[in-house]
Every structure is written in C-alpha cells, then in structure tokens.
Amino acid sequence: MSDFNSNQINIIDSVFEKSNSGEIHFSEVIQQLISVGIESYSVDYRRGETTYYLSNGSSLRLEFEAHPEKISKNFDAAKIKSAISQAQSGTVMYPEFKELSYLAGCIGYTVWIAGKNVQYFSRNGEVHTEHFPQ
C-alpha cells in the first residue's frame, strides 16, 4: 500500500515527464519534489527506473527507456563534474545530461534532497558526491 496521495503522484509524474523531456531544470525538479514531501530519489540507468522516497520510507517507482549499453565501462569523475556544471549553467538539459553521464561511466545516482547533495555511482563502486549549488 502506498502512502502517496493523488496530488503527490500527479506532481511526481509531471516532474518526471518534464525532466526527461528537457522541459525543466534540476532546481525546478527539486522545488516541486520538496512541495510534495519527497526526501530523496534514485535513478538507475541500467534498469531504467527512478524511485522517489517519502521520509516514512514509502516509495514510488517510475520507468524510462534504459540504455545500459551506452554506459562507459570506466568511471571519469571529471566528465561527471563537467556534465553537472553544464546542467547547472543551463547549457544542457536532462536528456543530454544523461548521455554525458553515460559517457562518464555513471550507472545511476541518488539525490539527497534533505542533505542537499547528489551521489553518482560507477559499476566498480566509485562515487562522486556533488553538493547543491548555494
């Protein structure tokens, strides 16, 4: 049984679709998710899933088209940092960010809204942590 109400689900669905189509920036995603009580969310590029979490542990999983074959075997933190910088400056939107992070060997990431950081993961267990811009 889900603890998500219909308003939360509608907003999460909208944020998911708009982000994946490149219509909204990361800061807008975060603002909207905070407004419905999302504490964190995880993106798994290999499975094509994004899972949103409430503070009570309830979760909502949405699927997108996975392309694990595009993910580089080697993790390159400099490439991840570059992709993040481009996204923060608005020069790339999420669809292009995903492609850049695949090339950097990123298999997914977790956004810790309360902790104001994102952890990007490699297939070998390497992690790059990026703090939200101030």
Image (tube, grey):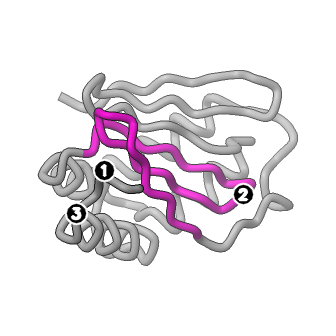
Q: Nearer the viewer, mark 1 or mark 3?
A: 3
Residue carrying label 1? 89
Residue that appears at 42% across and 44% down? 41
Separation (CA) of disc 2 from disc 1 = 28 Å
Q: Is residue 54 visible?
A: yes
Image coordinates for residue 55, horizontal then vertical, percent: 29, 33
Image coordinates for residue 104, horizontal then vertical, percent: 70, 43
Separation (CA) of disc 1 from disc 3 = 34 Å
Image coordinates for residue 85, horizontal then vertical, percent: 41, 42
Which of 59/23 is in front? 59
Q: Is residue 127 above or below residue 42?
A: above
Residue carrying label 3? 5
Residue that appears at 29% across and 31% down? 132
Q: Which mark is on residue 128?
A: none
Residue furthest front as drawn? 1
Disc 2 on helix, strand or loop? loop
Separation (CA) of disc 2 from disc 3 = 26 Å
Magenta stretch: give its range: 38-63
Q: Which mark is on residue 47?
A: 2
Q: Which amino acid lies under the numbered mark 3 shown in the image of this protein?
A: Asn
